[in-house]
Amino acid sequence: MTDPSDQASKASGKLGLWMSVALVMGNMIGSGVFLLPQGLAPFGWNAIAGWVVTIAGALCLAHVLAKLNASHDRAIGPAELVEHSFGPLAGFLIGFSFWVSVWTGCVTIAVGAVSYMASFWPLLGAHPSLAALAVIWLMTGVNLLGVRSAGSFQVVTTILKLTPLVVVAILIGLILSQHGTGVLAPYPTEGLSLPSVNAAAALTLWAMVGFEAACAASHKIRDPQRNVPRATFYGALLSGIIYLIVCSGITLMLPSDKVAASNAPFELFVATFWSPGPASLVALFAAISAIGAVNGWTLVQGEVPLEMAKRRMMPAWFGKTRANGVPVNGLLTATVLGSLLIFANSSHSMGGLFTFMALLTTSVTLWLYLACAAVALKRGIAMPFALLGLAFGVWSLWGAGPVASGLSVLLMVSGLPLYWWARRSSLPANDLSASTS
């Protein structure tokens, strides 16, 4: 049955319900899932429980964000929501942490791209840090050419990212229909382990980041107060189900030691249950998808400090743009910081580097979600979901471990000198949009 909002959207030019759901899923389903089976393999059935907890927690947080967004008469970002409730300093810390999550996320995705490209060029697997550096700087170069160049590149890679997921999901269905549940790893006799479930949930949350897409684009959605919460919920739920099926299938249907040792678990699964030829195509599509995701987030990592500079929450230097509109200072700064992070962790293996970066990015992002839950509690909006989301966020930070969670705090507060510099600046906010380098 066609949703009335989708029929009306044809005339208004705005997105209806199901197009909004597609927007959310498109932002959520990226390259993060392609290496997750490697990190989740040691957890076995605990990883399945971790997925269930993560999906439930993400749905609570998604509902809170949607309700907060619907309470305003215009589109408003999470950092601005926090600023309205807790003041400019809190708004800056959350906005800055989001910027940090973008460039740490770029590094994480770049490692995923290198992991699958190593299937074709094994030399990349021997030097994952250098290869990841090459990917993020290549995408920075593409974005320096302007938004049109970056957008054209993104169109090419969008559909390809779904191909490995669809192929693996179909294979899982066929195998289970022919052989039953006997192909799955046995359920542990000792039952599930809460610490293992917690650690797995912290890792799986990386793949769920992005469910706030409909909130950010609410001004482009028809009847946003009705459709944004529904699109956010349905998009997060459907993406979570896809993740649960494909990652669980790979984790439970292959020997855990082989999955843990594989730099391309999707390729390994297809090669095992189908043939090496299609497996190579799956690896290629996964690599292209990851590079496309790096390109998209590289675009964002320049825009976030630009918008913060316009609101005088970052120094005016970040608000300067080139003639083609590219915020070159913010873009290059983020790429340099991401490069330093890669160098600092260059001793890790491919899988170890990905797992650490995924946990770090998730930890940094969690501060944004926790702050939004706190805003909802203060304003009395979606109280039960805000409480559950807050508890889930704190639990996930604990599961990420003291190193990733502690570093996320240090990265967030490291921006305070920039905030004080911006507040002392005498350049009016309106002048920033006209500045060029």
Image (tube, rainbow, N blue to C red):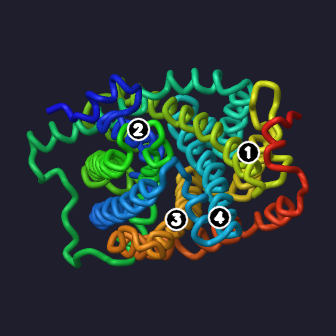
Tag 1: residue type?
Answer: Leu
Q: Quadrant of residue 137?
A: top right
Q: Which residue is mark 2?
A: 221
Q: Nearer the viewer, mark 1 or mark 3?
A: 1
**Mark 4 Cα within 10 Å, few/some/many (few <14, many 20+)?**
many
Q: Is residue 153 above or below residue 382?
A: above
| Residues at marks 2 and 4, CA–CA distance in whole angstroms | 25 Å
Quadrant (top left/top right/bottom left/bottom right) for the N terminus: top left
| Residues at marks 2 and 3, CA–CA distance in whole angstroms | 26 Å
Q: Is residue 250 visible?
A: no
Q: Secondary structure at mark 3?
A: helix
Sequence order check, earlier mark of 1 and 3: 1
| Residues at marks 1 and 3, CA–CA distance in whole angstroms | 22 Å
- The residue located at (46%, 36%) in the rendering is 220
Task: Evaluate if marks 3 and 4 touch, with contact meaning CB atoms under 8 Å apart.
Answer: no
Q: Secondary structure at mark 2?
A: loop
Q: Which residue is mark 1?
A: 306
Front position in the image: 57 or 195: 57
| Residues at marks 3 and 4, CA–CA distance in whole angstroms | 15 Å
Front position in the image: 123 or 213: 213
Sequence order check, earlier mark of 3 and 4: 4
Q: Secondary structure at mark 1?
A: helix
- Relative to 420, is 367 on the left or the right? left
| Numbered tag placed on residue 366 in the rendering | 3
Q: Nearer the viewer, mark 3 or mark 4?
A: 4
Tag 3: residue type?
Answer: Leu
Tag 2: residue type?
Answer: Ile
Q: Is residue 35 above or below residue 422?
A: above
Q: Secondary structure at mark 4?
A: helix
Q: Position of residue 115 (x, y in %)?
A: 53, 41
Q: Which residue is mark 4?
A: 91
- Relative to 2, is 127 on the left or the right? right
